[in-house]
Amino acid sequence: MEIELTAEQRAFRDSCGKLAAHLASRWHRGRGPHDVGPSAPDEASWSRVAEAGWLAMRLREENGGAEAGAVDMMILAEQLGHHAVASPVLGTVIAAEQLQSWGAASGLLEEIAEGTRRLAPALTPDLTGFADATGSLAWDAAGAEFAVVPATGTAYALGEPVPFADQTRAVRPLGEPVRTLTELTAPDGETAARTSAFALSLLVADLLGTMQAALDAALDHARTRVQFGSPVGAFQAVQQLLADSHVLTEASRSACWYAAWAVDALPGEEALRAARVAKAYASRSAVEVCENVIQVFGGIGMTWEAPAHIWLRRAHAARAAFGDEHHHEAVIAATEFSGS
Amino acid sequence: MDYSDDPEVAEFRAGLRAWLRDHLDEHRDATGYESAESVERTLRWHRALAAAGYVGLSLPAAYGGHGLPDLYEAVLNDELATAGAPPPPPIGHIAHAVADFAGEDLKTRVLPGLLGCTEVWCQGFSEPGAGSDLASLTTTAAPDGDRFVVDGQKIWTSGAMWSRWCLLLARTERDQPRHRGLSMLVVDMESPGVDRREIVLASGSREFAEVFFDGVEVPAANLVGERGQGWRIAMHMLSYERGPADMGWVGRLGRVLAAARDDVRSGRLPADEPLRRRLAAASVDLRVLQWHVARSLAGRDPGGSAGSVDKLLTTRIEQNLHHVVGDLAGASFVLGDPAPYGDYLWSRAQSIYGGTQQIQRQIVAQRVLGLPRG
């Protein structure tokens, strides 16, 4: 039993954090919804993402990857959440993972890994999972060329982004078919479960990074904002909100670590069960933490200028992607708590 | 990152499971402290565990322990809970205080009895006027030649009615600031001047007592560590009071949920969709708690404040679980077998004993998050 990050993983976390902060510095929320920066990264930013190897690292060697573990990908996803990065890294990585599980040609996967071909995963219209038909939505699709619905073997062009609460990610409708991928074959149940578990574990990490960043900012605010002659963080009512938020964040971290470890270490169905639990817990917790953070910020937290709403929006959107707590708890209720 | 057992741990786990298969049945009802008989059953269970080598796992072998890492205590708690066995004796924190601070003579005199479970111990900390604010305690142990003379009153002393020894936190230094004036003493509960009065809890449990000390003489050789070191030792103990035992607590909550699941699946208790969703949410909470405790144990920093995070999390999850299973029970929550209602009442104590929910939040806010003191 060794429940911690290795020295190598901590170094990777730091390097991811640096680049994530750089990417975040190139995106601006502007002065209001009329002025917000595009959720698609500029060419220079996307080149940095590809050069860092983020898009390639998880793929198998024959597809241009380095076969990184899900724990390493979790580390990356947490940093992307922490800096609220507006680059569709998770969308690309998840789409590539799914296509690889369907046996997509290594040429296509190598192009994705190099950043030259930009894809997004197609999800069901309620965003709760991978789509198996048309009428679906491409998630985290800023700047993507197309999305594939593997069950139909078809790649679709993408329409203009639909209104989406999260300012750092784009959701786009599937348009005209542009390409047929004849080589795709459905993965076995084991692989399909593992792929879903992988996607869920990344969303959990994104939620974790988001809530930790929000909480850190609220703590800074509570230490410096003075009312009645003392920092508001010295008042017990405020301390209790922040302490509860810390508990939720640390429990979510425990869930995140286990779920990510499980992706590569446990049988697919078990990994998926763990990922559902983690996603349900982190989804509920992230929203609660971000709401507490806005409360601690007070009025400024309700302005566009303050970043609090960016985190709350990202938390709500990441909560919805691949299913929120209600979705996963309904599955658990049906499988574990249904009467005879 | 690896949550699986190392080979030695797996072997220990397998041995323990085999032992439980052969011995658990005769001890299955050794829970609770509702009557003299149930106390005797519980103490018999503790002695059986000790005789089989499962008490004092993380204590030095020279004094009757087994010299294993803390992790083994967690495995023990985990396996006992999962098997539906009664908990192990709650003595790890007392044993560590004595083993880590007492002199050779005192260790040799008292640890074998403690770890062999032939002598029962209690912990005299809380007082009527010193609950959350423990350092304000007023029980005195006045130095007098080769002895101390103890006067005062302790409350919430678990197991005091049937204890032979009490690890007592008392004020020995009148002229020192409050945290530095405390010392830790080993008191023979059979000494003249010790008077105990049982406290019956709302749940019916008779585990607790008040203890009165009236001119009780304690040999100076029974001082643990140095004079004035009491607070430091007490804090060291609190870090051992949680930790591995949490794993057992999670296991026990798991059994509460599993019983509810069986009731729903068999149709014994009807559950509509909203209630089934709440049961599912409680199961999510419990699994996360299990992972959190495992992570917390693996990276444990004895004496740190992270234990407060764990207690806040456990309390939140436990109290919610009892609401859900209470709602599932419907009228049988209040009608018929009183045990489930007793368990519910005990869940309300979780946010009070060992540092209230409010104090724990303050510890997290100030010591973990570094917020200013008000």
Image (cartoon, grey):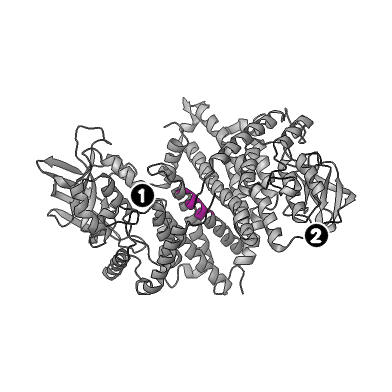
Q: Identify the subunit bearing mark 1.
A: B
Residue marked by disc 2: A185
Give left or right: position of B190 versus B63.
left
Q: Position of residue B332 (x, y in %)?
A: 48, 70
Look at the image and give the residue range highlighted in magenta. Answer: B288-296
Crowd rating for badge 1 (residues with CA inside 10 Å; few <14, some 14–19, many 20+): many
Q: Name which quarter of the figure residue A304 lies in.
A: top right
Q: Position of residue A41 (x, y in %)?
A: 76, 34
Of residues A303 and B176, the one drawn nearer to the viewer in this rendering = B176
How much space separates mark 2 and mark 1, taking CA atoms?
A: 54 Å
Q: Are marks 2 and 1 on the same chain?
A: no
Type of amino acid under label 2:
Thr
The residue lying at 48 percent from left, 36 percent from top is B369
Q: Quadrant of the C terminus of chain B?
A: top left
Secondary structure of the residue carrying tag 1 is helix
Residue marked by disc 1: B240
Residue B212's tag is none
Secondary structure of the residue carrying tag 2 is loop
Q: Position of residue B366 (x, y in %)?
A: 44, 36
Of residues A61 and A231, the one drawn nearer to the viewer in this rendering = A61
Of residues A82 and B364, the one drawn nearer to the viewer in this rendering = A82
Circle count: 2
The residue lying at 40 percent from left, 60 percent from top is B76
B291 drawn magenta: yes
Type of amino acid under label 1:
Tyr
- Please indicate, yes or no, whether residue A142 appears anywhere in the rendered image: yes
Q: Name which quarter of the figure residue A36 lies in.
A: top right
Crowd rating for badge 2 (residues with CA inside 10 Å; few <14, some 14–19, many 20+): some
